[in-house]
């Protein structure tokens, strides 16, 4: 593994399976009441320039279950938010902490922080990517389907940080992925071009379309996300109009495989990207998916911050 977790693209397929296997083990042991204080005495700083429920709580709880400590650092409070450089922040925090998790806007800022920090940096979401979420998603899919390679995932909605990362993750493990977004809302084409190489090596396909019915055909996993990501609040009215026809309804779900699962990174807006019958229906695995943030991230923390 590299020093940092900034993107799934820079992990190998083996790295991903090592994280998932460790996540499964830590989950099973936690449920059995066995805890490992692998990170005793270690501190993770958590920089947030955007809101969070799952990421903040799961990292903080994960660190405490591993015997360490997590520090919440809001950009409203730390000097980074007032113009202190990323370089100086990286250098100073490296003297106090054992790892940094950061949620912010620009992927480049996260890369720069990692470049100058001597400690591991974990991407807790940028406008481009959300790798921790997709590791938890892959763990969840494997729990339900027993495998990853050879499945078909369908993503319907905004081509955003989730779409980009799901494409990266699917390509790494050899899962087909078909993404349907309205014209003008497709995912990042650089991400697709990079992931295409992994997909070819694994014998899987990446398909981009504007037709949800094409994307969902024969899908094992149906995934969606909000139409209005953090930072896009001013575009809300236009987006709701532009995404008409992209809501995941029970009728649309019927076009997937009958045993398909419904996933969403949350927070979900019922009646927009998916109807409440789907979100709260029998195929939905959204809360298992949310729980797995804890287990998958504990595995990442152990891999990056545990004694080598
Ligand atoms: N899915 C996710 O990252 O949730 P939060 O924004 O609540 O952290
Ligand atoms: N696409 C969403 C994901 C939230 C976890 C956002 O960036 O706001």
Image (cartoon, rainbow, N blue to C red):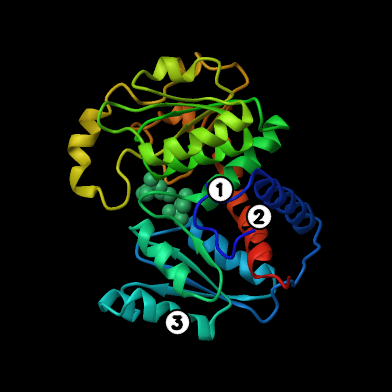
Q: Earlier in the sequence, mark 3 or mark 1?
A: 3
Q: Nearer the viewer, mark 3 or mark 1?
A: 3
x, y percent for residue 193: 43, 36
Compute the Cα span from label 2 to label 1. 10 Å
In this rendering, would 45 be left or right of 21? Answer: left
Query: Residue 160: x and y, percent?
Result: 36, 41
Q: Which mark is residue 295?
A: 2
SS category of the residue bearing label 3: helix
Ligand 1 under 8 Å from disc 1 Cβ: yes
The residue that disc 1 covers is 290
| Residue bearing mark 3 | 91
Q: Tags 2 and 1 in contact by the CB under 8 Å rule?
A: no
Q: Nearer the viewer, residue 196 or 64?
A: 196
Q: Position of residue 97 (x, y in %)?
A: 54, 80
On the question of residue 151 being in view, the answer is yes
Instruction: Tell me the quadrant of the picture where the N terminus can be found.
Output: bottom right
């Amino acid at each position: 593994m590299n020093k940092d977790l900034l993107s799934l693209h820079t992990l190998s397929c083996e790295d991903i399976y090592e994280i998932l296997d460790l996540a499964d083990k830590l989950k099973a042991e936690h449920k059995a009441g066995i805890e490992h204080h692998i990170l005793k005495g270690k501190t993770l700083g958590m920089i947030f320039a955007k809101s969070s429920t799952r990421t903040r709580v799961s990292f903080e709880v994960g660190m405490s279950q591993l015997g360490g400590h997590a520090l919440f650092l809001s950009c409203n409070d730390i000097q980074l938010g007032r113009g202190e450089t990323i370089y100086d922040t990286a250098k100073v925090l490296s003297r106090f902490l054992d790892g940094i998790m950061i949620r912010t806007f620009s992927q480049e800022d996260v890369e720069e922080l990692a470049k100058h920090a001597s400690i591991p940096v974990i991407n807790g979401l940028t406008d481009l990517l959300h790798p921790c979420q997709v590791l938890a998603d892959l763990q969840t899919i494997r729990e339900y389907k027993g495998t990853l390679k050879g499945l078909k995932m369908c993503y319907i909605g905004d081509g955003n940080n989730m779409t980009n990362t799901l494409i990266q993750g699917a390509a790494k493990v050899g899962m087909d992925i078909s993404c349907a977004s309205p014209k003008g809302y497709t995912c990042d084409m650089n991400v697709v071009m990079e992931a295409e190489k992994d997909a070819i090596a694994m014998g899987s396909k990446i398909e981009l379309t504007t037709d949800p019915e094409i994307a969902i055909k024969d899908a094992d996993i149906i995934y969606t996300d909000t139409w209005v990501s953090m930072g896009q609040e001013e575009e809300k009215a236009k987006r709701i109009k532009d995404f008409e026809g992209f809501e995941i309804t029970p009728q649309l779900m019927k076009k997937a495989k009958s045993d398909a699962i419904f996933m969403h990174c949350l927070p979900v807006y019922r009646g927009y990207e998916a109807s409440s019958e789907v979100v709260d229906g029998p195929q939905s695995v959204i809360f298992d998916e949310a729980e797995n943030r804890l287990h998958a991230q504990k595995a990442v923390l152990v891999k990056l911050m545990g004694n080598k």
